[in-house]
Amino acid sequence: MQRDPAERRRVAKNFSVALITVILIFAVLYVGVQLYAILHHTYKTETAILATMSDSVKLTGTAVFDATPVSGEGDLGYLVENGERVTVGTVIAERYTAEGQDLQREALTNLDREISLLNKSQNSSGSDLSVLTTQTQTALYNLLDQLDRGAYGNIRSAEEDFLLAQNRMQISTGQSSGFDATIAELQAERDSIAASLDGLENLVAETNGYFVSSDSAHLTTLDQETADNATVSELSDLLSQDLTASADGKAGWIVSGFSWRFYATCDLDTAARFDGLTSVKISVPGKQDDPLSATVVSVETDEEAGLAKIVLECGTINSEVLTLGQETAQIDLHTYTGIRIDSKALHIVDGNNGVYVKVGNLQRFRKITILYQNEDYILVDTDGAVGTDNEIRLYDEVIVEGTNLQDGKLM
């Protein structure tokens, strides 16, 4: 049955409207997608900064010291700090015999510190207000910095520096005429407490060296002669055991000499990285965080066992070092300083390594010569040496994330 012309025109019109509607919807969606891509096209940049990076390996081994035990047990109060150098006859600790004597000793120590601080405050000859103001501000910033970093071992010293600066300011500005009366009062209290502590048994140093308490030390039973004479396999077997020295009956140890050694074993590939090196940096994350200079004493390999013996010697002794025992140390083989950029920013254009930087509202490609690279960062040389193509500059805004990067293109 044929439709009449009017109905055919109505159907054709409806089809045309539907087709136009579909076309318009697709056009709107396409424009929307393009607008979204344009409006939400973002770039992430990072500032190129000067930094130091190290080519490092991890070695598991033990620190070995020339240590002499200090006999002593019971309720001990230490009168010297860990890492403090002592000589024969130095009183290291005292043994308490009655309850509360430890608190009296603490009060005595605090009084001595306070008296010393007040004496320094009024014996200072400096009276220039601008200098005193600068000293006070510097001491305050240092104290706040130590608090912010959680460097609790440095807070007391920073606090004393701030109080000293404030006291000197008070005297110089006439806010205080001096602290003689306060000092006399504190001295009387100090003498009374000291008298009550007379007669306590003292533990004295019988040799010269650096002291470390038994509570802090993790020294091992391994001595340098044994470690030096051990073969690669013998040292590996020794290091597989718990070598920690017993603290029973010991107040601590006195470490003689001015150096210590670190003995470790590793695979042959790791040992090969020490080839040609005479000095490295050693640190133990969480204990001795600051890398210390060390000498490579020897690298002995055992091809059959597939192992090597590494011996390092360090000439720095401090309170952190003296807590070392069997550790996993970080050994910095090579240290580099240069401009640091995120490794995600690296691009290769026409065979050239480089990065894109934000210059105004433009993208610019800058060629670089890589000095050192790890998984996270790249270091670029800063001295513009002959033969390098370092076009990046300190504090450039380097594009680390973005699409369709192109030299000269608008951001």
Image (spheres, rainbow, N blue to C red):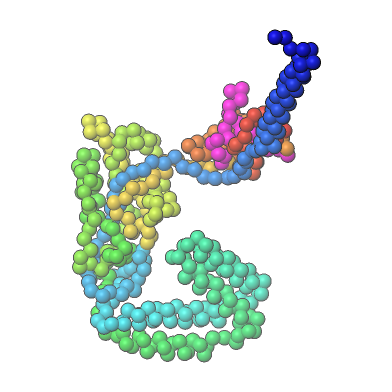
In x, y percent, where is residue 396?
65, 41
Q: Can see residue 91?
A: no
Q: Image quarter for residue 51?
A: top right
Q: Residue at x 61, y 22 (%)?
A: 350
Q: Residue at x 31, y 84 (%)?
A: 197
Closer to us: 180 or 360: 360
- Quarter of the image with the N terminus is top right
Range drawn in magenta: 340-360
Of all residues, the one furthest to the front in this rendering is: 1
Count of residue discs: 0
Q: Image quarter for residue 353?
A: top right
- Quarter of the image with the C terminus is top right
Closer to us: 239 or 253: 239
Query: Is 347 one of the magenta-colored residues?
Result: yes
In x, y percent, where is residue 260?
32, 53
Question: Seen in the image, is 117 located left or right of residue 73?
Answer: right
Closer to us: 256 or 143: 143
In x, y percent, where is residue 245?
22, 58
Question: Seen in the image, is 265 located left or right of residue 27?
Answer: left
Q: Image quarter for residue 67?
A: bottom left
In x, y percent, where is residue 332?
42, 43
Q: Residue at x 49, y 86 (%)?
A: 183
Q: Residue at x 33, y 88 (%)?
A: 195
Q: Can see residue 203?
A: yes
Closer to us: 365 or 42: 42
On screen, residue 374 above or below 110: above
On screen, residue 27 above or below 112: above
**What main secondary structure does the magenta stretch of the protein show?**
strand
Query: Is 71 one of the magenta-colored residues?
Result: no
